[in-house]
């Protein structure tokens, strides 16, 4: 059995994870918008709009991305997201013990993907349909 040290995620850590995930998704959209807009401006022979409108679109898009990340962030009132946890791994299960003495057990076969983002490992589970 592998047992991890006790840890707690802060609200800022949650935001960083959500924002970084959103940023990855939107980076390609930034590039596509910029290339299409530049091509349109060259075809229309109006480069002044490129200097004025493109930065405005990119700034508005950035604000939208930030707002979307804030929307998915758990509220500070929901303390169960921010409590200390202790995780241990078995051969076939993950055991999670929370600060409020609640416990969860998840089968390892439910994990479909895992990755590392910053200082955290993210586990993705599939939803079992009832």
Image: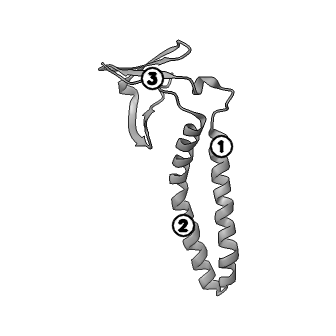
- Image coordinates of residue 34 in percent, x first then y, are 57, 70
The correct choice, above or below, for 114 with respect to 79 in the image is: below
Q: Please state if 46 lies on the left or on the right of 35 as rendered.
A: right
* Residue at horizontal 54 percent and vertical 38 percent from the top: 13
Q: What colouring style does the render use?
A: one colour
| Front residue (pair 36, 63) | 63
SS state under label 1: helix
* Residue at horizontal 65 percent and vertical 59 percent from the top: 61
Q: Quadrant of the N terminus?
A: top left
Residue for badge 2 = 32
What is the spatial separation of the Cα atoms under label 3 and label 1, in whole angstroms? 27 Å
| Front residue (pair 110, 114) | 114
Q: Quadrant of residue 6?
A: top left
* Residue at horizontal 44 percent and vertical 34 percent from the top: 124
The correct choice, above or below, for 41 with respect to 99 in the image is: below
Q: Identify the mark nearer the N-term, 1 or 2.
A: 2
Mark 3 vs mark 1: give the one in front. Answer: 3
Which of the labelled discs sits on residue 95, or is there none?
A: none
Residue for badge 3 = 6
Q: Residue furthest bottom?
A: 45
- Asked whether disc 1 touches disc 2, contact meaning CB atoms under 8 Å apart, the reply is no
What is the spatial separation of the Cα atoms under label 3 and label 2, in whole angstroms? 43 Å
- Image coordinates of residue 89 in percent, x first then y, are 35, 22
The correct choice, above or below, for 124 with respect to 29 in the image is: above
Residue for badge 1 = 70
- Asked whether disc 3 touches disc 1, contact meaning CB atoms under 8 Å apart, the reply is no
């Amino acid at each position: 059995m592998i047992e991890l040290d006790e840890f707690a995620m802060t609200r800022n850590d949650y935001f960083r994870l959500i924002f970084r995930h959103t940023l990855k998704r939107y980076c390609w959209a930034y590039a596509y918008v910029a290339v299409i807009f530049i091509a349109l401006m060259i075809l229309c022979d109006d480069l002044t709009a490129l200097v004025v409108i493109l930065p405005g679109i990119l700034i508005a898009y950035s604000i939208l991305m930030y707002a979307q990340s804030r929307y998915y962030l758990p509220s500070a009132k929901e303390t169960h997201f921010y409590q200390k946890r202790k995780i241990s791994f078995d051969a076939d299960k993950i055991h999670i013990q929370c600060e409020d003495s609640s416990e969860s057990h998840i089968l390892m076969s439910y994990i479909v993907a895992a990755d590392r983002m910053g200082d955290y490992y993210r586990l993705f589970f599939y939803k079992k349909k009832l």
